[in-house]
């Protein structure tokens, strides 16, 4: 049991402490830095927004996109995946006369294609070589395009991801007057992505990333739902770099509750595993294994750590067991607060409950996603309800 205990605790410690430390050291010793262009580098871009029943946010999304601080022409392609609400009507009737150098194109489908299928179908229609990919519920800071595009000065960079920040509904009204409002999890993620980029490549987030049209990998649309992860792997396998730009910021509203977030994380994990199956691991094995795979199965290590700890009677291990019981007790209280509707986010739940609750929610959702993926059923593109 001691062997199981120490393997479990080392694996968890490696994911959240040793790996970030190694990244910080290795990226300092062997940096692969890249030059960035100044803000005068502003080629025309195509902005692709996949939609499925986005009538609540698409009008604001179009306004946000059209008003971005970018001097060159912007082509906006709304790719609608057979919405059953008024999304297409809102796009068709949107007035763009006050937005020079901007145009909106609606590409709609008569049957469901899935997000990956929608992107694969509309990418060839984009007029420009630089493509911005985003979600309908993600709102960019005014200079986000400039910050993304400047990284393409280096010809070896094929894809650039930005920073996703989760904010409240009230803050969505003016994204330029708020700071980076992510919690510890997103700060941790952004640190990892920044250091991985310096080492070579990282993985982008689907809410904000840019790619060169000629190297878009066209992942298999019938098997993949996680476009960002699949595109990242595809670009890397084409011998281009995928890097992180911390100053290119998009904002999303908080989810309506952690149960919605739990469902989303299950789906993310299953989609990511499918992407790895489609794109066999050829490069950045160190980042993929340490950043993704070990974290995805951290729920297994949490279970084996707790169970093995129960069967070890020595005082040192008993003390650690008490700490685990306290940790899961705080997690349970966080669950009760969420279930009773008394706390819908970190803003109202004390950190002493929120941190262990969110950590366990994420780890166990990923474990369930891993189990369901093993069962062979692929999830469909679905919507996560957010407070926007």
Image (cartoon, rainbow, N blue to C red):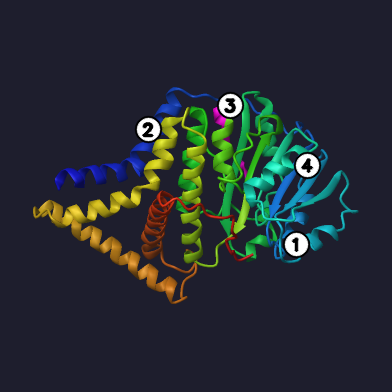
Compare marks 1 and 4 and give the one earlier in the sequence.
Answer: 4
* Label 1: few (<14), some (14–19) or many (≥20) C-alpha neighbours in 10 Å: many
Most foreground residue, 376 or 26: 376
**Residue 262 in picture, x, y percent from top left:** 46, 60
Q: Which residue is mark 4?
A: 70
- Relative placement, left or right, of 323 versus 372 is left
Which of the two marks, 1 or 4, is nearer to us in this view? 1
**Picture disc at residue 238:** 3
Q: Quadrant of the C terminus?
A: bottom right
223 shown above or below 130? below
Per the model, the C-alpha gap separating discs 4 and 2 is 38 Å
The magenta region covers: 236-249
Residue 326 falls in image quadrant: bottom left
* Label 3: few (<14), some (14–19) or many (≥20) C-alpha neighbours in 10 Å: few
Compare marks 4 and 2 and give the one earlier in the sequence.
Answer: 2
Per the model, the C-alpha gap separating discs 1 and 2 is 46 Å
* Label 4: few (<14), some (14–19) or many (≥20) C-alpha neighbours in 10 Å: many
**Picture disc at residue 22:** 2
**Picture disc at residue 367:** none
Q: Are marks 1 and 4 in contact (CB under 8 Å)?
A: no
Residue 50 in the magenta stretch? The answer is no
Compare marks 1 and 2 and give the one earlier in the sequence.
Answer: 2
Per the model, the C-alpha gap separating discs 3 and 2 is 26 Å
**Residue 327 in picture, x, y percent from top left:** 29, 61
Does any portion of residue 67 appear in the rendered image? Answer: no
Q: Which residue is mark 1?
A: 87
* SS at circle 3: loop
* Label 2: few (<14), some (14–19) or many (≥20) C-alpha neighbours in 10 Å: few
81 shown above or below 245? below
Q: Residue at x 54, y 35 (%)?
A: 233
Most foreground residue, 72 or 180: 72
User: Is the stretch drawn in magenta largely helix, strand or loop?
Assistant: strand
């Amino acid at each position: 049991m001691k062997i199981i205990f120490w393997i479990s605790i080392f694996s968890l410690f490696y994911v959240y402490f040793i790996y970030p430390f190694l990244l910080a050291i290795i990226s300092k010793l062997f940096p692969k830095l890249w030059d960035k262009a100044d803000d005068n580098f502003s080629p025309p871009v195509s902005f692709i927004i996949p939609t499925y029943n986005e009538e609540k946010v698409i009008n604001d999304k179009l306004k946000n996109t059209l008003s971005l601080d970018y001097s060159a022409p912007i082509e906006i392609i709304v790719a609608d995946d057979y919405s059953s609400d008024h999304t297409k009507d809102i796009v068709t009737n949107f007035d763009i006369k006050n937005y020079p150098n901007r145009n909106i194109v609606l590409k709609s489908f008569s049957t469901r294609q899935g997000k990956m299928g929608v992107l694969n179908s509309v990418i060839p229609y984009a007029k420009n070589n630089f493509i911005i990919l985003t979600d309908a519920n993600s709102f960019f800071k005014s200079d986000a395009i400039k910050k993304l595009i400047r990284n393409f000065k280096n010809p070896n960079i094929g894809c650039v991801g930005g920073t996703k920040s989760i904010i409240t509904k009230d803050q969505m009204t003016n994204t330029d007057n708020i700071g980076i409002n992510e919690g510890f999890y997103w700060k941790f993620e952004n640190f990892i992505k920044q250091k991985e980029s310096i080492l070579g490549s990282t993985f982008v987030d689907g809410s904000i990333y840019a790619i060169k049209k000629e190297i878009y990998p066209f992942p298999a649309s019938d098997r993949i739902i996680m476009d960002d992860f699949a595109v990242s792997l595809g670009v890397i396998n084409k011998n281009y770099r995928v890097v992180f730009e911390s100053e290119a910021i998009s904002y999303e509203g908080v989810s309506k509750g952690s149960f919605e977030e739990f469902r989303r994380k299950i789906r993310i994990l299953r989609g990511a595993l499918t992407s790895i199956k489609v794109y066999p691991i050829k490069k950045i094995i160190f980042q993929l294994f340490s950043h993704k795979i070990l974290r995805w199965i951290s729920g297994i290590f949490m279970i084996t750590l707790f169970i093995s700890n129960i069967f070890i009677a020595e005082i040192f291990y008993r003390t650690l067991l008490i700490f685990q019981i306290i940790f899961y007790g705080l997690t349970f209280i966080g669950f009760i607060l969420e279930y009773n509707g008394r706390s819908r986010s970190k803003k109202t739940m004390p950190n002493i409950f929120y941190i262990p609750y969110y950590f366990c929610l994420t780890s166990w959702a990923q474990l369930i996603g891993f189990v369901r993926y093993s069962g062979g059923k692929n999830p469909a593109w679905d919507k996560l309800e957010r407070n926007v």
